[in-house]
């Protein structure tokens, strides 16, 4: 005796495809206002370059950093939807791991400082240059750091390292 069950997954595949296409469309539409914000921020910085106070300069740097984060986030969403649709092509590039990890830490620096977290860092070897898709790797590493910062208690420690083996 055998039992055979057949399941039609074509409807689910259509829903998944529609979701991926929506994410791709939405990310493309978000690029226009983000580009306008970035352009206006650059104009503002040029206009006020000689008159900015130190405090105002810190604010403009934070805005700039967050504009870049938004652009990267939009690109990440687009990459994920392309992965889902099977149209994603990795863009390999040479990356200095120390600088890459510095950039990740900078994204979370404000929250790390607010919570009084200690970062334990080991780059072994320092300034290792390796080849990978930095956008995809950013999704993974940024997610890990975000969770660490979120869930480690105030005054706690985070180990943020890489090591070359083999």
Image: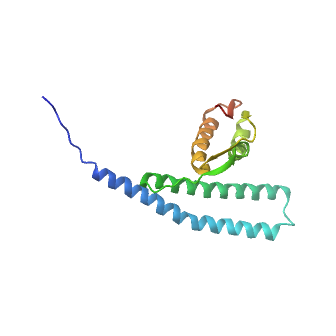
Residue drawn 75% across the image and 68% down it: 44
Q: Where residue 12 sits in the image (x, y, percent)?
A: 31, 50
Residue drawn 68% across the image and 31% down it: 159
- The number of discs equals 0
Q: Is residue 5 left or right of residue 150?
A: left
Q: Quadrant of residue 164?
A: top right
Q: Is residue 100 left or right of residue 9?
A: right
- In the image shown, does 124 or 65 lie closer to the viewer? 124
Q: Where residue 38 sits in the image (x, y, percent)?
A: 67, 65
Q: Is residue 165 above or below residue 32?
A: above
Residue drawn 83% across the image and 66% down it: 49
Residue drawn 78% across the image and 66% down it: 45
- In the image shown, does 78 or 59 lie closer to the viewer? 78
Q: Quadrant of residue 120?
A: top right
| Quadrant holding the C terminus | top right
Residue farthest to the right, as pictured: 50
Residue farthest to the front, as pictured: 166
| Quadrant holding the N terminus | top left
Q: Is residue 53 above or below residue 158?
A: below
């Amino acid at each position: 005796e055998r039992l055979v069950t057949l399941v039609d997954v074509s409807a689910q595949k259509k829903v998944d495809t529609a979701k991926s296409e929506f994410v791709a469309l939405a990310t493309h539409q978000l690029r226009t206002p983000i580009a306008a914000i970035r352009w206006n921020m650059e104009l503002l910085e040029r206009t006020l370059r000689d008159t900015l106070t130190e405090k105002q300069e810190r604010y403009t740097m934070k805005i700039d950093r967050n504009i870049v984060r938004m652009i990267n986030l939009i690109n990440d969403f687009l990459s994920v939807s392309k992965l889902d649709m099977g149209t994603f092509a990795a863009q390999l590039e040479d990356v200095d791991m120390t600088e890459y990890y510095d950039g990740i830490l900078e994204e979370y620096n404000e929250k790390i400082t607010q919570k009084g977290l200690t970062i334990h860092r080991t780059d072994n070897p320092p300034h290792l240059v390796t080849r990978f898709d930095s956008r995809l790797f950013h999704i993974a590493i940024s997610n890990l750091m975000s969770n660490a910062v979120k869930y480690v208690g105030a005054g706690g420690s985070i180990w943020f390292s890489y090591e070359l083996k083999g």
